[in-house]
Amino acid sequence: MSKNKRKRRSMRQKEFFNSLIFFITVMTIVFGSIIYLWVHNETKLIERNNIILIKTKQLLIEENKKLKGDIARLMRADRITKIAEDELGLITPTPEKIVVLVDDDFYEDIE
């Protein structure tokens, strides 16, 4: 009888260890799959955000070029002169109307 009890115990132990190994294997596969899916999902989200950022960068570069062109157009001297004459009523001075005043005290202080 003692041999039968040992066989039963050893069979029970083998079944327990086999069940334990099966359970650990299944849990490892499940958790590994969950981790893989999480990493895969995060990678896809990062790729999508990178595409959005690249498109935003391109739009901002185009807008910056447009604004630089607008600044160059607005700073043209002929445009400024036209606005000064038409809207503000200013006149462009002729060379004979320009009077240069020389401050003699200024030159004395330099010497």
Image (cartoon, rainbow, N blue to C red):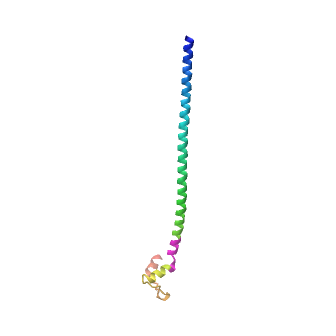
Q: Residue furthest left?
A: 88
Q: Residue furthest bottom?
A: 96
Q: Position of residue 89 (x, y in %)?
A: 42, 84
Is 72 a magenta residue?
yes
Image point (55%, 39%), residue name = 33
| Res 102 visible | no
Q: x and y percent of residue 93 in the render?
A: 47, 86
Viewer can see residue 12: yes
Going by the image, does 84 lie left or right of 14? left
The part of the chain drawn in magenta is 69-78
Q: Is residue 73 above or below residue 19?
A: below
Residue 67 lies, in percent from the top left, at 51, 69
In this view, the residue in front, 105 or 48, is 48
Q: Position of residue 13 (x, y in %)?
A: 55, 21
> 28 or 46: nearer the eye?
28
Instruction: Tell me if residue 105 is in the magenta stretch.
Output: no
Q: Quadrant of the N terminus?
A: top right
Pick the front one: 30 or 51: 30
- Considering the whole magenta stretch, tell me its main secondary structure: helix
Residue ID at (54%, 67%): 65
Picture quadrant where residue 91 is located: bottom left
Q: How many marks?
A: 0
Residue at point 48% right, 79% down?
80
- In the displayed structure, 17 sits above or below 98; it is above
Q: Residue at x 45, y 83 (%)?
A: 86
Is 84 on the left or on the right of 4, as rendered? Answer: left
